[in-house]
Image (cartoon, rainbow, N blue to C red):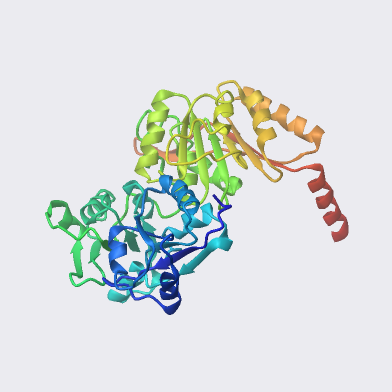
């Protein structure tokens, strides 16, 4: 649809019952012909009723149907389309979808005061001191990753994230003393701003205008959800309970996270994800990266899904049920991501935590997929696995196409035996990290070294 030549005007309406538009936005409405389109929700159409225009009024359909609608309107003779939006169309508004769908040359934006700004001003909050979280059209569980103590969150809500739902999440997190302020129908005659403790809502039958913004000030209580890297093992649901079973232990996980060095926009595969210790933590701390966890064992898959939900990483963590390397073909074709994520394509970083005897083929296949600068990390406990990784390392040495780092992590945790203290060791874990580079990259690095000398 990026080829459309129609100007698309995106007009922010503000937070008033009757929109207050600037001269530029008013001029756009006045210029519309009978063949043009004004698109918005019924309530949005009502807010501009006092601005006359000749265009055809259309109610906003689902986004999955909107692409085709634009093509139909253009074929029917429309020369311009006006999209009615929230106060700031480019801040958790429809603007982002329009920019992904159409050429930027065809888009014109007319911003207004947003409900977020209005709520902050009602409560004397500086916008830079709060964190905005959109729950509109998103799973309520996605709130959990933000529920740490002593935070101020501004929540954009929908029918599934109303005050009682938010309060229940606070109580589950151990933050039942949190303060919830509901800003209802901002800018309308029936506007209300009411504040309650989270624990009050659980038993309350209060009703609120569905058009609301919630300001959540979390309490100083200790939250179930971590605020720093290194989630305790016991916080995870595992196949043997109490943080035991198929989970990469906290100290080893910290090392893996450091070496993986996840950046915004990375696509990361966690192969042999087990119960999800590594993949969940990567997704939790890097919401703008896409993590794909691959696991085939039914019990571990169930734990992985439970941990995905527990920590609210439901938007950027995809779970693939299958055994690598066979499953990778379908994964690359986009046939296995039936959740809320789209096809991610090839990864640029891969962690292999388990391979069920297929490690040689798996490392080779993954290495071919990685781009220049991509990285592969492998963990090994048994001598057989270490031997296979060392063979792969030797192949990389011969091909001169990788930087390698390896280390062994040995952990002994303090325990008590009767009245005596002792340190009980765990099996050492050997970690191998390979960073891929091409001959061109190698030549550039060599030149840099020679120039430095």
The x and y percentages for residue 160 are 27, 49
Q: Is residue 146 above or below residue 435?
A: below
Q: In screen coordinates, is 245 left or right of 373?
A: left
Q: Picture coordinates of residue 408 (x, y %)? A: 61, 37
Say which quarter of the image contains residue 111. bottom left
Is 58 situated left or right of 438 in this image? Answer: left
Which of 180 and 14 lies nearest the eye of the viewer? 14
In percent of the image, x 32 and y 72: which residue is there? 19
| 91 vs 223: above or below | below
Q: Is residue 330 above or below residue 423?
A: above
Looking at the picture, how far across and down is residue 193, in whole percent?
21, 69
In which quadrant will I find the C terminus? bottom right
Residue 428 showing in the rendered view: no
**Considering depth in this image, is 284 or 93 the residue closer to the camera?**
93
The part of the image, by quadrant, that contains residue 255 is top right
Residue pictured at 22% horizontal, 60% vertical? 177
How many callouts does the rendering have?
A: 0
């Amino acid at each position: 649809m990026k080829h459309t030549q129609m100007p698309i005007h995106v007009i922010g309406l503000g937070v008033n019952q009757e929109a207050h538009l600037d001269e530029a936005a008013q001029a756009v409405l006045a210029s519309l012909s009978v063949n043009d389109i004004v698109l918005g929700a019924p309530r949005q159409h009502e807010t501009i009723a006092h601005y006359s225009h000749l265009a055809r009024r259309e109610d906003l359909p689902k986004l999955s149907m909107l692409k085709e609608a634009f093509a139909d309107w253009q074929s029917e003779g429309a020369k311009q389309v006006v999209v009615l939006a929230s106060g700031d169309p480019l801040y958790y508004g429809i603007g982002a979808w329009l920019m992904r769908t159409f050429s930027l040359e065809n888009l014109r934006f007319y911003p207004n005061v947003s409900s977020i700004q209005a709520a902050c001003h009602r409560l004397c909050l500086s916008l830079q001191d709060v964190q905005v979280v959109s729950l509109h059209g998103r799973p309520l569980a996605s709130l959990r990753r933000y529920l740490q103590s002593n935070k101020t969150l501004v929540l954009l809500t929908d029918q599934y994230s109303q005050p009682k739902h938010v309060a229940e999440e606070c109580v589950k997190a151990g933050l039942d003393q949190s303060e919830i302020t509901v800003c209802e129908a901002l800018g309308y005659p029936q506007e209300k701003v009411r504040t309650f403790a989270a624990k009050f809502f659980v038993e309350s039958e209060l009703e609120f205008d569905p058009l609301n913004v919630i300001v959540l000030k979390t309490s100083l209580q200790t939250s179930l959800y971590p605020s720093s890297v290194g989630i305790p093992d016991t916080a995870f649901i595992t196949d043997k309970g109490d943080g035991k079973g198929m989970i990469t232990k906290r100290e080893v996980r910290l090392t893996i996270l450091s070496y993986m060095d996840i950046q915004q926009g990375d696509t990361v595969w966690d192969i042999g994800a087990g119960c999800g210790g590594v993949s969940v933590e990567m997704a939790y701390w890097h919401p703008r990266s896409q993590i794909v966890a691959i696991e085939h064992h039914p019990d571990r898959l169930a734990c992985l899904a439970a941990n995905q939900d527990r920590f609210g990483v439901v938007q950027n963590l995809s779970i693939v049920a299958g055994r690598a390397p066979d499953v990778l073909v379908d994964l690359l074709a986009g046939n296995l991501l039936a959740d809320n994520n789209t096809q991610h394509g090839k990864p640029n970083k891969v962690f292999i935590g388990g391979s069920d005897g297929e490690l040689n083929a798996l490392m080779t296949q993954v290495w071919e997929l990685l781009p220049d600068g991509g990285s592969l990390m492998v963990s090994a406990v048994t001598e057989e696995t270490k031997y296979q990784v060392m063979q792969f390392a030797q192949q990389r040495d011969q091909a001169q196409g990788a930087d390698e780092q390896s280390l062994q992590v040995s952990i002994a945790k303090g325990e008590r035996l009767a009245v005596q203290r002792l340190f009980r060791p765990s099996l050492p874990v050997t970690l191998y990290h390979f960073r891929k580079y091409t001959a061109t990259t190698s030549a550039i690095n060599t030149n840099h070294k020679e120039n430095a000398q």
